[in-house]
Each structure stands twice: as C-alpha cells, then as structure tokens.
Amino acid sequence: MRILGIDPGLTRCGVGVIELGASRKVSLISVDTFTSSADLELSERVGSIGVRLQQLIAESKPQAIALERVFSQQNVRSVMGTAQISGVVLMLAHQAEIPVYLHTPTEVKLAVTGSGRAAKAQVGAMVAKILGLAEVPKPADAADSLAIAICHAWRAAGSTATPSGEMTGAQKAWHAAERAASASKRR
C-alpha cells in the first residue's frame, strides 16, 4: 500500500510518500517540503501549494492519504494556514477518490516513538531509523510527514497506537467531541 503523509502548513507543508510491505515494513518513496512566501497573496500561497500537492498525488498514486489533525494550538495564524492547506488536501483527495485518514500529533508520536510526548528530534530520529535513512529528513516538517504516513501504515496493517489496543487520550477526546457534535446535530 502506498501512503502519502502530509504535515499541512501554509509556509512549510511536509509531504512524504512511503510504501507498506509485508510484516509492516515501510520504505521511503519520496519526501519533500512545499513552501510559500509570506510576501505573496493568500490565494497565491494556497494555490501554489495546492498545485504541487495535485502533481504529487498524480505522480505518486497513493492509495491513502494520512493527514495531521490539529488538536489545539495557541497561534491562530498558524492554525488558519494549517486548516487552509488541509482543506486543499481534502478536496484533492475527493477529486482523486483517495481516502483520507486524520491522525493527531500525539497519536503519531506514540506510534513512531512509543511516547505521545516525544520531542521533534526523537520523532525525526525514529523516522530515520524505521526507514533505514542515513540522516533525519530536514526540515522537521518533512520528517513529520513521514511519521504521519508511518503511523497510518502501521494502523492499516492492523496495529494499534498502544500495546493494549486502547485509544490514546487525544483519540478518546476526539471521539467524544465527534459524538457530541453528532448528537447536537440530531436535536
């Protein structure tokens, strides 16, 4: 199974493509970071990253897209850029009929390092180790995109984020929030 992992961002959007093989073995296909300058108009920034994402999807032909789900963040401008690029990804995936799977940062860290509180350097080091790379992909957005793809690959292969099979605290919070939102819509 080929998986495109995306760490969405307006200034830096990490993109990593991996292949899931037998016995949960993952291998690197490609990794990159798409950037846009803050000096450009918003539509030009979103559009330029969108075009590059569209090209990557067409060229790499993923069977799944794993996208980071932002749980909470203090910087509203950063959240807006992340949301805007996430929207582009969702639209492109819909057009290409590729399923999208959302994973929280805690879920990704736990899957790749064994700790939901791992530092960026730990995530990068484990990504390099898992994929057999000589160096950690740079910048961190590139390594994060691969971590997101690896997290999804291992979940798709039937593994869970915790050894006991229980959801992480972040996953429980998301499921509870989604149930509450669905319940309020039915009223």
Image (tube, rainbow, N blue to C red):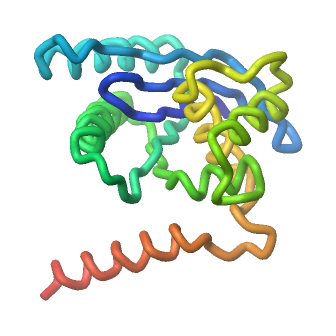
Residue at 42% across, 50% down: 69
Residue 166, quarter of picture: bottom right
Q: Quadrant of the N terminus?
A: top right
Horizontal and vertical percent for residue 93? Answer: 37, 34
Horizontal and vertical percent for residue 145? Answer: 56, 32
Residue at 65% across, 59% down: 116
Residue at 68% across, 51% down: 118
The answer to whether residue 75 is left or right of residue 154 is: left
Horizontal and vertical percent for residue 108? Answer: 61, 50
Horizontal and vertical percent for residue 110? Answer: 69, 57
Residue 21 in view in this figure: no
Residue 128 in view in this figure: yes
Q: Quadrant of the C terminus?
A: bottom left
> Does residue 83 lie above or below 161 as drawn?
above
The answer to whether residue 32 is left or right of residue 46 is: right
Name the foreground residue: 71 vs 73.
Answer: 73
Query: Which residue is most to the bottom?
Result: 187
> Does residue 90 lie above or below 185 as drawn?
above
Residue at 42% across, 25% down: 13
> Does residue 177 lie above or below 85 as drawn?
below
Q: How many marks?
A: 0
Name the foreground residue: 161 vs 81.
Answer: 81
